[in-house]
Amino acid sequence: MSTPPSARTYNQDHIPRSPDGRRRISIYWTWSYPAEAQRDPAEIYNRFSTITEVRNAVWPAYETPDYDPAYFLQGIAGTLELFHRSTLSFQHLAGAATGHPVAVFQRVDQAGYRLPIDERILADTDTLMVFGLDHLLSDQQAAPEEIEAIRNWLHREGTCLLLAPHHDVGFTDDYTQRQTEFRHHGDPLVPRQQRFSGYTRSLMAALDVPVHNIWGLRPAVVDGTTEIAPLTRFPDLDGPRLLDNVTTLNFHPHLPHYQLTAPEGESLRVLGRQRVDPTRPHPFTDAGNTEFNALIWMPPINTRAGDIVLVDSTNFTTLFGGTDSLKNLWHNLATMK
C-alpha cells in the first residue's frame, strides 16, 4: 500500500527551525497574490494566464477531476496555485537532505497578510530563495528596512541569498520586436509583453548585485530530439560545487538572460551558460550571442559573509518537466558548504 501524502496546513504561524548545522531553506514569493489573481482577464499584457487558458493550451493535461471547479481555484488564482504545487518536489527533496522543512512565504498572501522580509523570516533561514514573479506594474519594491535586514543577515556565516528574477518579455514599444520575441519563445500563455521582478530588481540594486534580467529566451535542444541542450559549465569557478553532476537545467521556453553590468571576475562568476535556439530569430541572437547566462555566483566579499546565487525559479519547479540532473542541482543547493 502506498504511503498517503502528508497532511496539508494553511494560514498558520511559522514554526521556527532550530539550528543544527544543516541548511534551513525558505522560499519567498515576491508577488502580491491578490494583486496578481485579480488582474482583469480581458487585459492581454502583464498578467498570468487563467486556468482556462492553461487548460486550452496544454489540453488534455488538466482535464481531470482534480482541476474541477469544485476542487480547484479557477481563473488566474488557479494558475498561481499551480506554481505553488510545482515546488513541492523540490521541497520534499530539500527537506530530506537537510532534515528541515522548507518554509514558504509570500509578500502578500491569499488571506491578505503582508510579510516583508525581516527577522521573522531571516532568523531561522540559512538559504533564502527570492522568487521574482511579481509583475512590474504591481510596483513591488524592497523597503529600506528589508534591505538593511538582508544586508545584516548576509553578515552571518553560512547564509546564501538566491535571487531569481524572471523574464522581461516585450519591454519595448516596438510591436515588431514584441512579435519577434513572441515567435521566438512560442508559448501562447506568455503575452507579447510580460515584465517581471520589480521587487528583486530593487533588491539587487540596493545590494550592489551587478545583474539585469532581460529577455525571455528559448533554449536550444539536442539535434533530432526535444531534450534541452547541455549546459556550458565552468567547474573551475564553481566553489560551492552547485553544478556537480548537473548537465542540464530545466527546459522553459522563455528564460531570462542574466546580463552582467560589471566585469566578470573573482567576485562575479558565471557558472553556467545555456545555448539559445538558433532556429528562431531574436534580437539577442541577431546581436551575435549564442548563449545566455543561466547561473551566477557571487562569493563572500568584504563584510558580506554569505553567498549570492542567481538562477531562474523555474529550475525549482516541475511545471516544465524535470530530470535527474535538475534534482542534483536541488541537492547541491540544499547541502552547499
Image (spheres, rainbow, N blue to C red):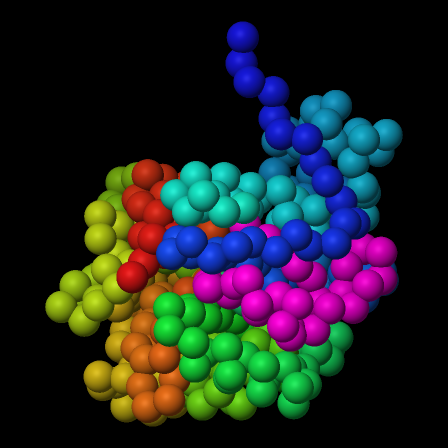
Numbered disc total: 0
In the displayed structure, would residue 124 be above or below residue 157?
above
Q: Position of residue 227 (x, y in %)?
A: 33, 42
Q: In the shown orientation, is residue 266 left or right of residue 118?
A: left
Q: Quadrant of residue 139?
A: bottom right
Q: Residue at x 61, y 20 (%)?
A: 4
Q: Position of residue 141 (x, y in %)?
A: 67, 82
Which residue corresponds to the image point at 37% horizontal and 89% vertical from the top-left? 303
| Residue 169 seen by the camera | no
Seen from the viewer's position, the closer of residues 46 and 30 is: 30
Which residue ends up furthest to the top in the rendered image?
Answer: 1
Quadrant for the C terminus in the image: bottom left
**What segment is highlighted magenta in the picture?**
102-128
Residue 171 is left or right of residue 90, and the answer is right
Front in this rendered view, residue 39 or 226: 39
Across and down, in percent, residue 34 comes to: 82, 61
Residue in the image at 57% along x and 69% along y: 122
Q: Is residue 164 part of the magenta span, yes or no?
A: no
